Amino acid sequence: MPNDTIKSILTRYSCRDFQEKMPSEEDLRAIAEAALASPSGMNRQLWRVIVVKNRELIAQIEAEGMRNIAALPDSSIYARILSRSGKLFYGAPCMVVVPIAKAEPGGAELFDCGIVSENIALAAASLGIDSLICGLAAFAFAGEKGKEFKRRLGFPEGYEIGIAVLLGFARQPGGKPHQLDMSKISFVE
């Protein structure tokens, strides 16, 4: 039987239909602290962790993201969202926004951002909270509206959106993680 950490990893899935129920303040604080515990290249910690519980603000960010995605020349992303629920944030009552600053060499901050988002998702899973790592949230932070959202969320100067992680409880509990493709594992001796 795997330990609790491995159980959280193996059972975590991307929730795409959230209830309105907000996770507890205590759990959100624990998740935010788990994000801060993330390792980063040379310990630069070029990220911030912003827990957003304001549903009206989340709805505004979602609407702007959908507007920007709908305007893309390739309509496949927009069509996929519409086919799933028509909502970019799937009704999540809470999201953690992770702004990042540029690193040298460029792009290193993206690895760190990925680690932070995974720590958030796994901490949430360990507490019985469902999540979705949402890279598409970045579309909401373009243009003048994006500048307004950065200001309202308190992005530090020079920081840009890295990723968002949606948090809440599944409307229909029991979602399944993706199937493991064991052919992707190899051992070299």
Image (cartoon, rainbow, N blue to C red):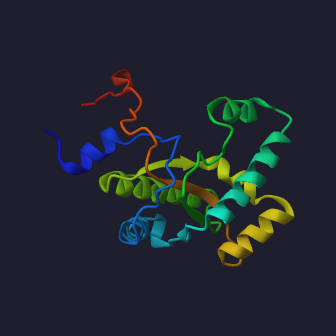
Decide which of 139, 158 is in the foreground and name it.
139
Decide which of 154, 158 is in the foreground and name it.
154
Q: Is residue 114 visible?
A: no
**69 relative to 29 in the view: left or right:** right
Instruction: Report which quarter residue 25 is drawn in.
Output: bottom left
The residue that appears at 74% across and 35% down in the rendered structure is: 78
Q: Position of residue 30 (x, y in %)?
A: 36, 69
Instruction: Report which quarter residue 57 is drawn in.
Output: bottom right
In this rendering, the answer to whether 36 lies above or below 172 is below
The residue that appears at 46% across and 69% down in the rendered structure is: 42
The residue that appears at 52% across and 41% down in the rendered structure is: 17
The residue that appears at 46% across and 49% down in the rendered structure is: 131
**55 relative to 3 in the view: left or right:** right
Q: Which residue is farthest top?
A: 183
Q: Which residue is farthest left?
A: 1
Decide which of 42, 49 is in the foreground and name it.
49
Q: Position of residue 49 (x, y in %)?
A: 53, 69
Q: Is residue 21 visible?
A: yes
**185 relative to 71 in the view: left or right:** left
- Quarter the C terminus occupies: top left
- Quarter the N terminus occupies: top left
Decide which of 185, 10 is in the foreground and name it.
10
Q: Position of residue 37 (x, y in %)?
A: 38, 68
In this rendering, the answer to whether 144 lies above or below 18 is below
